[in-house]
Amino acid sequence: MRYKTIDKHLFIKNRQKLLTHMRPNSLVVLHANDILPKNTDSTMPFVQNSDLFYCSGIDQEETILLLYPDAIRQEWKEILFIKETGAMLAIWEGNKYSKQEARDISGIENVCWTSQFESTFNVLMGLVEYVYLNTNEHIRAACTVETRDRRFIHWCKQRYPLHCYGRIAPIMQQLRGIKEKGEIALIQEACNITEAGFRAILPHIRPGLMEYEIEGLLSYAFLSRGSRGFAYAPIIASGANSCILHYTNNDQPCQSGGVLLLDIGAEYANYSADLTRVVPIDGRFTTRQREVYNSVLRILKTTQEILRPGLSFADYHKEVIAMVEHELCTLNLIDRTDIKNQTQEVPAYKRYFMHGISHHLGLSTHDLGDTYDMVLPQMVFTVEPGIYIREEGIGIRLENNIAITHDGIQNLMQHIPIEAEEIEELMH
């Protein structure tokens, strides 16, 4: 792997936390993701199932994890199945994990080949009463492809129709929202790599440079530091493109007089960073661009100040929206009459600030975690206010990654330049 070895005790502790939520005499089944096809005999790069990685640290296809804490035999309590390597496979693809390597990474003693799964599973299903199966239940998920998890659900229920089945997704939603110190350290490393990439490109930005050239420079900066690349499709949006929230074409030239919005993040050990910065293409912000930039920056700084353990997400949202409304009035984009006459369905601020202020960050860029109750220690969030003035071709979004501590926050991007003057100075 490109990343440094992760302490196996992180995965041991994650499994222990999961076990406390299981019913008596129950079994958890977690599968690796598929390697997805492209065209002819080509495939997409492999990305591990986040829940499986969370519980095992195994970053390889055709992996299965069984957890059966009430098993009558010790060797049945945790069983890890991995793809068997061989001489021919090694020639074509290189070596896969050995059983000992899988033990060292995961902390699981009983490691078997994937070819042994069905016979072992059949024995255990004769003993268990309840089976937890995995699905992607992220609120923004829109999966039209039948996953390995989905195929296994069909197979398992057809073969064992009288067992009781349950969803592991709500448990993982709760567990993965609270990060261990080791996880926060991995996110911090992803942020550090992202910082290096951002600093590296600033002197190169100029009118006429193509958006994809900047993407290429960032890709090199990330890959050369042990990342597998971007944690998500990068947004390199110049001029009016900065007002398109999920612009990923990255195929236009940077025009003089405009701004360049960079929504980028490196992946490290499957963990994501998520940074947004805006820079002036000419090296200096115009008066209007600086006005909007500083408005967004004030919202970001104040938002970071109010984030604390025990704050309800509802109150957090209300406070942020009040700040956004104030800044939009200051910029003469809306006024108090607009706010007075707004409806709940179409609030006035939504014309210029259309997205949420925060999301969980971790093994996924939009990670699992509760966003309905309250902010808790060891949660990791983005904070990303924005103002998008389409009629002026100015889109400003600023984003940091924040870990909640027991008495406040830790800004994981505190060393990444953000003040307008600092950005301009680095560009020159």
Image (spheres, rainbow, N blue to C red):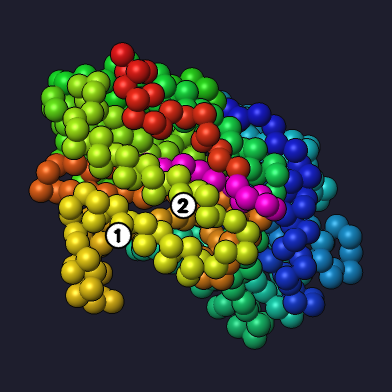
Q: Residue furthest left?
A: 391
The quadrant the C terminus occupies is top left
Residue corresponding to mark 2? 303
Quarter-of-image position of residue 132: bottom right
Whole-percent x, y for residue 14 in the image: 72, 54
| The label number, if any, that marks residue 388 in the structure image | none
- First reached walking from the N terminus: tag 1 or tag 2: 2
The answer to whether residue 407 is magenta is: yes
Quarter-of-image position of residue 343: bottom left
When the figure is inspected, residue 337 is found, relative to residue 49, above or below; the finding is: below
Q: Residue at x 48, y 63 (%)?
A: 316
SS for dot 2: helix
What's the distance in space between the residues labelled 1 and 2, CA to CA?
Answer: 14 Å
Whole-percent x, y for residue 182 in the image: 70, 42
Q: Which residues are magenta?
A: 397-409
Q: Amino acid at mark 1?
A: Glu
Q: Residue at x 65, y 38 (%)?
A: 185
The quadrant the N terminus occupies is top right
Q: Residue at x 48, y 20 (%)?
A: 224
Residue corresponding to mark 1? 325
Whole-percent x, y for residue 289 in the image: 21, 36
Q: Nearer the viewer, residue 324 or 174?
A: 324
* Residue 47 visible, this orientation: no
Q: Nearer the viewer, residue 150 or 139?
A: 139
SS for dot 1: helix
The answer to whether residue 180 is magenta is: no
